[in-house]
């Protein structure tokens, strides 16, 4: 049964108020970040705050239009919308404008459009449509693989631009899969992969691999509860390792110690399979596969880090991890950002009185490092208010997602939450020196029309879907 509902009565007004507050506060900080005494008019198009005001006005019109589109449109055309944005991501690699070695924008007259910002909504819609039809069956590989493919396809295309920051954002959609039934073991494995990534960078690779193998033997003891079994495994590993080492030392003379350890692990595991089969030691088998996979992963990370990342990307990670210090080079952004935020003190220096901002010490202070302006001019109190607004928005969206009658609406809601969460956490983490600089904007706050429209598209599609729960009786 269908019943008509007044959209403006049913739409969640708390979310809209928070949205408007963030947009207004964002514009004020953009104005402060690029303030020019010779250009004080808010519609001065030679200044970023003038251009952003135009984007804000068009965004409000765009948001209203999204609320008036029938919610069934988003469901039935989810795959088509996703496919359209995938085509745009392909096209931008060929016809896009290159800025700072990244081909991610279409230049249309005076306007630059970044399709990856809009493709987030398309990906969220496609994931919601797919999982809505499959139910919570993500424990099945036949369901998990297509869902993973929907996420990874745009992520890989964006990585080819290359825009690693936005690529990381797309990986946040795995949070949606976790909410919809993805095994917690898979989720924990992802976290462990992140930990191993940093361990590989912080410590000698040989130490990390040796530690993983040692941990494998200890875990095997806790599972098998047999010291004799562990000793057998260690004996086979050392015997196979000794043979491979001797062959390499006297004949091959081309294998390094890491390759020898990997080969030893593989062949000793094969030799130990008889024990696993005989005693049905599934726990030991799982531990072995985990250790083998971890060792291979560590070697892959080491290879990609040294051969795939660009020098400036490596430097940013190394500075964050305190592997190296470069306060005047790659570490300049983070260093100046932390100084700017810290100089604001408790109450801040006041609107338009930020010296770090006024004298342009912080690069990208109206985009990726907009939070520096908040910290310097509004101080701890202002920064807390801004962070509080984001936390309140995320909690409100979480409440809205959980009250949905439709699985499609709920899943899309979690897609919105995941994207906003990763942007909020990473951007402020960059500004405060907690995370490496990967260049992603603060939602509704940073300068940029594509990002503002992209976040608005996500948020207001979900608000329209939320309204729809009143329109159809299930």
Image (cartoon, helix red, strand yellow):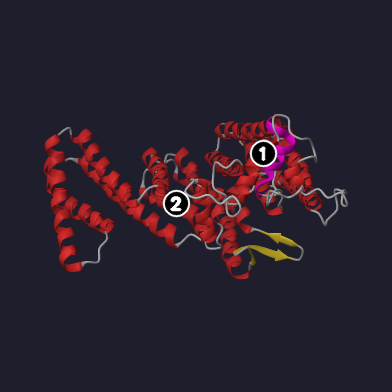
Are the residues at dot 2 and dot 1 in contact (C-beta closer than 8 Å)? no
User: In which quadrant will I find the N terminus?
Assistant: top right
Q: Which mark is residue 148?
A: 2
Question: Where is residue 224 drawn, in percent x and y?
Answer: 18, 35
Magenta-highlighted residues: 368-380
Q: Position of residue 34 (x, y in %)?
A: 77, 49
Magenta segment includes 374: yes
User: Which residue appears at 47% of the width and 38% of the height?
Assistant: 179
Q: Which mark is residue 35?
A: none
**SS at badge 2:** helix
Q: Position of residue 274 (x, y in %)?
A: 12, 48
Q: Nearer the viewer, mark 2 or mark 1?
A: 1
Q: How many labels were placed on the picture?
A: 2
Direction from residue 101 to residue 13 in the image, left or right: right
Crowding near the residue tagged with mark 2, few <14, some 14–19, many ≥20 C-alpha atoms within 10 Å: some
Q: Is residue 201 left or right of residue 216?
A: right
Does residue 464 appear in this view?
Answer: no
Q: Which residue is mark 1?
A: 341
Sequence order check, earlier mark of 2 and 1: 2
Residue at (70%, 29%) from the top-left corner? Answer: 346
Q: Nearer the viewer, residue 440 or 351?
A: 351
Nearer to the camera, 390 or 351: 351
Which residue occupies 37% across, 56% down?
300
Q: Secondary structure at mark 1?
A: helix
Query: How far apart in space, not on screen, are marks 2 and 1 (Cα)?
Result: 39 Å
- 405 vs 154, nearest the viewer: 154
Q: Give the class, few, some or many, for how many residues have Cα within 10 Å of label 1's Cα (few <14, many ≥20).
A: many
Magenta stretch: includes residue 390: no
Task: Kindly report the secondary structure that dominates the magenta region of the rendered protein.
Answer: helix
State which quadrant residue 228 falls in: top left
Quadrant position of residue 82 = bottom right
Kindly tell me whether residue 317 is visible in this rendering.
Answer: yes
């Amino acid at each position: 049964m269908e019943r008509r509902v007044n959209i403006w009565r049913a739409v969640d007004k708390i979310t809209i108020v928070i949205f408007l507050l963030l947009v207004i506060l964002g514009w004020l900080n953009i104005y402060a970040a690029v303030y020019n005494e010779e250009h004080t008019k808010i519609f001065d198009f030679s200044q970023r705050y003038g251009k952003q005001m135009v984007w804000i006005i068009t965004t409000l019109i765009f948001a209203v239009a999204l609320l008036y589109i029938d919610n069934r449109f988003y469901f039935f055309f989810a795959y088509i919308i996703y496919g359209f944005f995938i085509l745009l991501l392909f096209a931008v690699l060929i016809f896009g404008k290159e800025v700072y070695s990244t081909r991610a924008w279409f230049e249309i007259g005076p306007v630059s459009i970044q399709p990856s910002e809009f493709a987030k909504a398309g990906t969220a819609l496609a994931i919601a449509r797919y999982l809505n039809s499959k139910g919570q069956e993500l424990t099945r590989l036949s369901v998990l693989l297509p869902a993973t493919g929907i996420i990874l396809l745009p992520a890989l295309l964006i990585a080819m631009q290359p825009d690693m920051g936005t690529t990381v954002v797309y990986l946040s959609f795995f949070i949606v899969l976790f909410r919809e039934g993805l095994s917690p073991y898979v989720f924990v494995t992802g976290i462990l992969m992140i930990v191993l990534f940093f361990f590989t960078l912080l410590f000698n690779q040989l130490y990390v691999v040796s530690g993983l193998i040692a941990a494998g033997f200890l875990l095997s003891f806790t599972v098998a509860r047999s010291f004799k079994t562990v000793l057998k495994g260690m004996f086979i590993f050392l015997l196979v390792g000794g043979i491979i080492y001797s062959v390499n030392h006297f004949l091959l003379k081309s294998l390094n110690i890491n390759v020898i350890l990997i080969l030893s692990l593989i062949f000793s595991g094969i030799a130990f399979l008889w024990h696993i089969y005989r005693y049905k030691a599934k726990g030991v088998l799982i531990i072995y596969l985990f250790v083998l996979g971890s060792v291979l992963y560590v070697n892959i990370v080491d290879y990609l880090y040294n051969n795939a990342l660009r020098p400036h990307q490596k430097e940013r990670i190394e500075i964050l991890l305190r592997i190296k210090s470069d306060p005047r080079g790659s570490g300049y952004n983070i260093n100046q950002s932390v100084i700017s935020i810290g100089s604001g003190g408790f109450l801040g220096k006041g609107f338009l009185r930020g010296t770090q901002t006024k004298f342009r010490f912080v690069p990208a202070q109206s985009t990726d490092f907009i939070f520096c302006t908040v910290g310097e001019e509004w101080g701890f109190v202002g920064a807390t208010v801004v962070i509080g607004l984001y936390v309140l928005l995320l909690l409100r969206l979480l409440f809205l997602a959980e009250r949905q009658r439709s699985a499609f609406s709920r899943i899309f809601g979690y897609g919105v939450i995941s994207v906003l969460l990763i942007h909020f956490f990473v951007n402020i983490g960059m500004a405060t020196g907690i995370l490496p600089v990967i260049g992603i904007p603060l939602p509704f706050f940073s300068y940029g029309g594509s990002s503002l429209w992209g976040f608005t598209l996500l948020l207001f599609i979900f608000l329209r879907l939320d309204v729809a729960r009143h329109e159809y009786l299930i």
